[in-house]
Image (cartoon, rainbow, N blue to C red):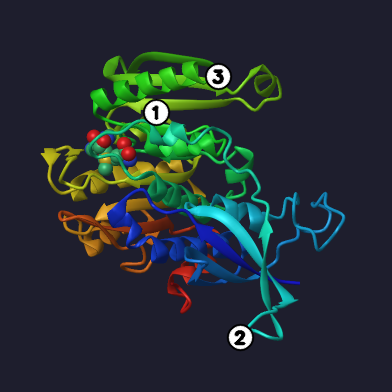
Amino acid sequence: MTSTVTVLRAPSANRVYASRSGPLAAAEAHWVLGAHLGAPSRVTERAVGGMDALRIEGLELTAPRGVSTDPAPEDHTGSDAPALRLLASLSSTLGLLEDVAGAVQGEGCGGAGTLLRPLDLPPVLRHPGDLETILKYPGKTNEQFTALLVNLAAALSTRRAGLFDGTLTLLDPLCGRGTTLNRALRLGLSPLGAEIDRKDVEAYRAFLATWLRTHRYKHTVTDGRLTRHGKQLGIRIDAELAPDKQAQREGRGQTLTVYGCDTRELAHLLPARSVDAIVGDLPYGVQHGGRSAAGWQRSPLEVLAEAAPGWRSLLRDGGGMALAVNRHTLARSDATAVLADAGLRVISADGAFRHRVDQSIDRDVLLAIPTDHPQAEQLAALGTDERTP
Ligand SMILES: C[S@@+](CC[C@H](N)C(=O)[O-])C[C@H]1O[C@@H](n2cnc3c(N)ncnc32)[C@H](O)[C@@H]1O
């Protein structure tokens, strides 16, 4: 039996983002549910008691036979149904309500109607929220949007279930001060990052070490030099962390590596075909420039053109990529062409995630997969589905 679920949405801390957060959340749900569950769900925006929400129809909430530990089919509370976990992981989910048929009494609504039953949110985040929110700096990617990028990139991977058991390998090849890495850590992943600006890498290292110490985590944070063929490329940060000894003993520890170097070096530093999901917020050509062979560029096109072949070589064939771009400084047709040259196919529609950040940034997301991705056609169909919000 399928259900209709209302996802109550958390307000966005960012006022400008908030004005587009409804369509963005709907588009995220469309892609994430469609990819994980194998068929698009009907997603529409709605309001419940004055709160912003999404209505999602046709969801199978009970866990597949043999997986659920819950004996009562009508009681979803505490079950490990994939759909509930997915809904809980969406970037703006605050709460979940399920439609149930019921008699609605009262003036103006005699007869049968629909009641909303609260559902428990399965826990999907392993660490406190301040891991994502404490560090503030100009050029930081907003956390809600970062969570959306992570979910989208993971959904494109054939190993997408690894988002929930810690086994998905995620790389942010332009990681700044670690907004994506922190989201990935909260999800229980062991992410990788690269950042050319040494100040950013050192600031992130200092923040993470302090956060782990103040939260009394079992951890080590080490830094070292990054060399290749005797040439110094930059620095490298490695961290190991677990909330406590028991988590460490039970193998719930996580690792993190940041390569403080040019993203174009990554293909020489990591094993080929070892990454499931790449999440990148490309330099906007405003706050951040892009470093390419020709030096610092205003347009991120050069950095994308030079880095994309290496990023592709790191992605597994069944991997996926979510890239945030500024439409003012990077034309979609140019980005699509350089990604195609690198063996990557853009499958999201033009403007599918379009929103204004400020006067100089008109942002969109490019979802790309290797041309030989085994699920290429099913995934591409989500980008052209007429129900795409
Ligand atoms: C839009 S910012 C990403 C911000 C990041 N998501 C955060 O919240 O901190 C783009 C980043 O790409 C970095 N970058 C630009 N060119 C690079 C290159 N060739 N190699 C590595 N990083 C580069 C910039 O230094 C900048 O930190």
For the N terminus, give its image quadrant: bottom right
Residue drawn at x 60%, y 69% as measured from the top left: 39
Q: Quadrant of residue 247?
A: top right
Residue drawn at x 45%, y 73% as measured from the top left: 388
On screen, 356 above or below 234? below
Q: Which residue is mark 2?
A: 108
Spatial CA span between label 1 and label 3: 29 Å
Which label is found at residue 269? 1
Front position in the image: 299 or 31: 31
Q: Position of residue 80 (x, y in %)?
A: 73, 50
Ligand 1 image-quadrant field = top left
The amino acid type found where label 1 is placed reads: Leu
Q: Is mark 3 within 8 Å of ligand 1?
A: no
Q: Which residue is mark 3?
A: 217
Sequence-first disc among 1 and 2: 2
Local crowd size for mark 1, using a 10 Å CA cut-off: few (<14), some (14–19), many (≥20): few
Residue drawn at x 50%, y 64% as measured from the top left: 53
Q: Is mark 2 within 8 Å of ligand 1?
A: no
Front position in the image: 97 or 229: 97
Q: Position of residue 236 (x, y in %)?
A: 37, 20
Sequence-first disc among 2 and 3: 2
